[in-house]
Amino acid sequence: MIGFWIAAAGLSAAVAALVLRGAARGLASAGDDPALAVHRRQLSEIDELAERGLLAQGELKAARAEAARRLLAAADQGAAWPKEGLGPRRVVVAAAAVAPLLALGLYVAVGAPGAPDQPFEKRVAQWRAGDAALLDPPRIVAILEHVARTEPNNVELQRNLAIARMASGDAVGSAEALRKAVRLAPQRAELWTALGEAFVTSEEGQVGADARTAFTEALKRDPANLSARYHLAKGDIADGRVETGLSAWRAVLADLPAEDPRRPVLAAEIDRTAKAGRLVDTAAQQQAAAGEVTPEMIQGMVEGLAQRLAAAPDDPEGWVRLVRAYAVLGDAARRDAALKDASERFKDQPRVLAALRQAADTAPQNPSAPRSNAR
């Protein structure tokens, strides 16, 4: 090891010397050297004699070779290392040589030069042989991934790997393991449910297309699946089908046992969603079913939504709908103000910010135009 560091220091000094010598040559060649000018002129004269037919081909090659040799020799002599700046150059070369030695000293002082290699496979074997209760999730993931390479068709292994990855904060990796699990056992509803929940976690709580597909597959196999029903209803609410989603949530709440700790949480969520009245478009459609929607009706609904958000501002979906409503009404000032307030409140939630921007880009419409109920 010491020999390596000494060799590294020597190479560093040699490279520094070569770099500085090249710089010196560049400085030397920057000026006008009379000797070099004479040799270049001789080459030009040889070419001129050849063009005029005064030199045979063999004589031309010999003359050019000799002139070029003299030019190179003169250039080498003229590119000698200048004495100006010799002190700084020595400092640079010395620093290049000393730097690896200082690094070696620091490594010896604070490092562990005598520590043996620790191959990853060996460490995984040690973790497997130890007490699993003392291992953190990343080490458990490493063990399960190692075992999964030899047992690729083990459904329970993939399921446990997904749980360990989720515990270690890798929702995407968890979904990948559950994808393999549902391919191996597509009839198991709990695997589809776990896959949907992994998608929701990776999408920061949003019930996206992949999650809905997984939950739908779970319901095909287990129509009473509470998690799948809850999340699909949440997706309906996010898409504007508030009453449909609330009805589904109430059915889930009714099916939960009385002692289930999830009951008060879901009940509070149902109450909060029902009170918000957050879908302007849905409310407008309901009004349209009874008669023509007037601008005053729409303005009243929008003002009511704005007042509710002022009282309970931690409602990203409500802010998205408020921004969209102002955009539809063509009220650019209020739209921009609501967009600014919501963007500042949810600045750490990129999905909400993207939804807000999309809502702000909604084209204005004429709210006083009659709406047709024809399909």
Image: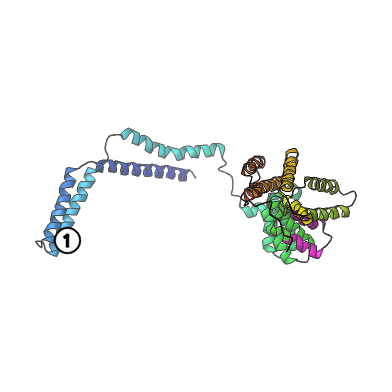
**What residue is rendered at 62% in x and 44% in y?**
332
Q: Is residue 330 left or right of residue 302?
A: left
- Residue shown at the point (15%, 50%) measured from the top left: 41
Residue 218 percent across, percent down from the top left: 78, 62
| Secondary structure at numbered mark 1 | helix
> Tag 1: Cα neighbours inside 10 Å, few (<14), some, or many (≥20)?
few
Residue nearest the observer in this picture, 241 or 103: 241
Quickly name the residue at label 1.
61
Q: Above or below — where is 218 with respect to 359?
A: below
Segment tinted magenta in the rendering:
213-237
Decide which of 322, 184 is in the foreground and name it: 322
Image-quadrant location for residue 372 = bottom right
Residue 236 falls inside the magenta stretch = yes
Residue ID at (37%, 44%): 14
Residue 148 in view, yes or no: yes
Residue 96: image location, x then y, percent:
41, 39
Whether residue 241 is in magenta: the answer is no
Vertical comparison of 265 with 208: above or below: above
